[in-house]
Amino acid sequence: MGRLIKEKAKSDVDKLFSGFSKTRESLSVVDELLLYWNLADTDRVLDELEESLLVSDFGPKISFKIVDSLREDILAGKLKSGSEIKEALKTSVL
């Protein structure tokens, strides 16, 4: 019985860490998107960001909230560069 519990625990830990790698891979796309971001691409980039967050298992509610907040800040002129958006994204995720 103890061996089965240990194997199950190891399997759960492996799944957890493989999930993190999936998140890391999905969000690396965001780095590239924001590197070349410009105001004209805002809607496209935010749509792709939202998709990346959903694929990364953030869930629809959190993904939409993060992207809507970023969109509002961009339109209000609070975020003017890809690096500022990236920092705001990090803050939102944390």
Image: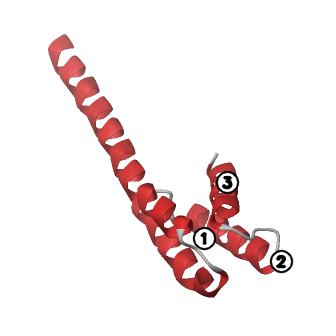
Residue 69 sits in quarter? bottom right
The spot of residue 39 in percent (x, y) is 66, 82
Q: Is residue 79 left or right of residue 9?
A: right
Q: Residues within 10 Å of mark 1 (few under 14, many from 20)?
A: some
- Kind of element beneath mark 1: helix
- Name the element at disc 2: loop
Q: Which of the numbered marks, if any, corresponds to residue 80? A: none
> Between 56 and 45, which is closer to the camera in this rendering?
45
Q: Residue furthest top?
A: 2
Position of 62 with respect to 72 (left or right) is left
Camera-side mark, 1 or 2: 2
- The residue wearing badge 1 is 64
Question: Residue 80: x, y in percent?
Answer: 74, 71
Question: Which label number is shown at residue 76?
Answer: 2
Quadrant (top left/top right/bottom left/bottom right) for the C terminus:
top right
Q: Which residue is mark 3?
A: 87
Report the amino acid beneath label 2: Ala
Gap in angstroms between the C-alphas marked 3 and 2: 17 Å
Spot occupied by residue 22 in the image (x, y as percentages of width and height): 34, 51
Q: Residue at x 64, y 57 (%)?
A: 89
At a point 46% along the width and 64% down the height, the residue shown is 32
What SS does tag 3 mark?
helix
Which image quarter is the N terminus in? top left
